[in-house]
Amino acid sequence: MLYILLPAYNEEKNISKIFKKINKIKKKISPFKVVLIDDCSKDNTKEIIKKNCRFNLIYKKHKQNRGLSITLETGFNIINKTAKKKDIIISLDCDDTHPISIIPKMINGIESGNHLVIASRFVHGSKINGLSNMRNVLSIGAKYLFKIFYPFKNLNDYTCNYRCYDFQLIKEILKKKYFFKNEDFNIAAKILIFLINNKKNLKLKEIPFTLNYQYKIGQSKMKLFRTIFLTIRLILFKKI
């Protein structure tokens, strides 16, 4: 079984596009379930979901806004209740910037013996469209900082949330109490650092993809300076 985890906050204008793209490839990835965690959206996210869903969906809405880290934790915990040993989890952003079409390739990477497949912005064949120069510089800077402090063979993209996990990796992380607390958009890097430090013989693969930031409708939910602070804290001071 494949689980596609979508964290959503005020994404009514993007969700219908993502659902249509999932419908186009559903024969290639079946059986699968979409787990959508609504982080207390104030728009018509729930109504849009009802109108556009044509597949097996688990929907849960937070009673208050909790941020990306807790939203992922909620989704992982829901999946953990029913997932089996050989199941696969894909996490991606719900703003239509991550191409749904590469999901079969990511699954194939796990079935070929990898524990983790990362859609990487920093490998040959990748492209970044529509991202501001400042955000691009910050992403590249974060890449090199993580490579200095947490080097790992063939790993370049520590912060992209578009990933395919062997379910057993997530199961181990969920055993660590408070792992997701007091984090936000830096959680993608924290998960990766934990796996590097704690998973023996970790096998990961990066695949190229095109980040189409111009497809996103609406403002970014990332609080830039908070994310920078949390990332620096993670790199320099946080023991995982």
Image (spheres, rainbow, N blue to C red):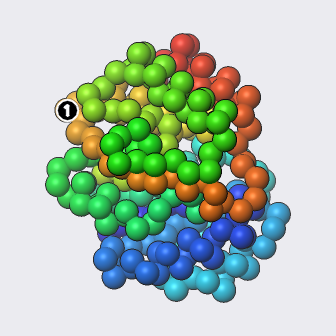
**Secondary structure of residue under mark 1:** loop
- On the image, the x and y values in percent for residue 2 come to 36, 66
Q: Is residue 113 visible?
A: yes
The amino acid beneath tag 1 is Asn
Q: What residue is shown at x 29% (from left), y 61% (from top)? A: 105
Q: Quadrant of residue 42?
A: bottom right
User: As displayed, is residue 146 above or below residue 53?
Assistant: above
Disc 1 target residue? 201
Q: What residue is shown at x 38% (from left), y 32% (from top)? A: 156
Decide which of 176, 33 is in the foreground and name it.
33
- On the image, the x and y values in percent for residue 178 come to 56, 34
Q: Is residue 75 visible?
A: no
User: As displayed, is residue 85 above or below residue 170?
Assistant: below
Q: What residue is shown at x 55% (from left), y 37% (from top)? A: 187
Q: What residue is shown at x 67% (from left), y 33% (from top)? A: 134
- On the image, the x and y values in percent for residue 23 come to 46, 81
- Pick the quarter of the image with the N terminus: bottom left
User: As displayed, is residue 50 above or below residue 182?
Assistant: below
Drawn side of residue 195 relative to residue 158, left or right: left
Drawn side of residue 179 relative to residue 120, left or right: right
- On the image, the x and y values in percent for residue 58 come to 54, 72
Which residue appears farthest toward the top when viewing the image?
236
Decide which of 104, 164 is in the foreground and name it.
104
